[in-house]
Image (tube, rainbow, N blue to C red):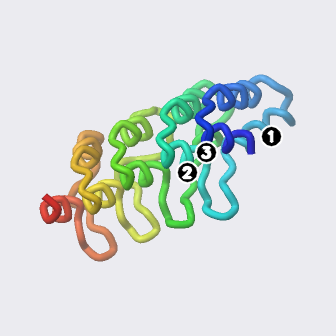
Amino acid sequence: SPAWSAAVHDRPEVIEVLARTAANESLRTAAAAARTLAEAHPVNGWTVAHVAVELGRVAVLDRLLQASSSSEGMSSAVVVPRFFDVDGHLPAHRAAIRGDAPMVRKLLQHNTTPFAPDDRTANGATAAFLAATDGHAEVVAALADLGADLNAPNHDAATPAAVAAQNG
């Protein structure tokens, strides 16, 4: 889709055009533009937000978040939907795995994103648990600052705090 291509090639201006179209054009055109911004890839389940996070496309994510807060009459979930990928991850989980604290903050601090600090993956892990597992102390600290529960156990009763202590 045009939005996916924009995320892959770091073209935030295309995201802006699609968002403007979704907000200003006829109902039929607007619905098509909104679907383009929100659709998930049929194979891996990634949305444009997943792609932006995975590739570190800060400007693309910024435009998506701006579009979600300025789209008249459109739910923020249309632009930045709450879709889990095939691995059971939301975009904030992908950012935590990558160790990208600024991206985690951006996703969780923006007032229109449908993500919370203690959202769980399909196997019960929080973003803090995923970051702690990979030794991303800055992400764990950012999540704690944003209200994440570092004692929230996953399905195996392991907590982010315990994993962080093990990993130093």
Q: Is residue 94 above or below residue 31?
A: below
Pick the front one: 160 or 132: 132
Q: Is residue 94 above or below residue 159?
A: above
- Amino acid type of the residue that numbered disc 2 sits on in the rendered structure: Arg
Distance from label 2 to label 3 (Cα)? 11 Å
| Furthest residue in direction front, as rendered | 9
Which of the two labelled residues, at mark 2 and mark 3, occupies the earlier sequence position? Answer: 3
Neighbour class for label 2 at 10 Å: few (<14), some, many (≥20)? some
Is 19 placed left or right of 103 in the picture?
A: right
Indicate the secondary structure of the residue bearing disc 3: helix
Indicate the secondary structure of the residue bearing disc 1: helix
Indicate the secondary structure of the residue bearing disc 2: loop
Residue 151 percent coordinates (x, y): 21, 60
Residue 125 lies in what quarter of the image? bottom left
Distance from label 1 to label 3 (Cα)? 15 Å
Q: Report the residue at 27% width, 62% height from top.
A: 133
- Amino acid type of the residue that numbered disc 3 sits on in the rendered structure: Val
- Work out which quarter of the rendered image holds the N terminus and state it: top right
Is 80 placed left or right of 145 in the picture?
A: right
Q: Report the residue at 51% width, 37% height from top.
A: 57
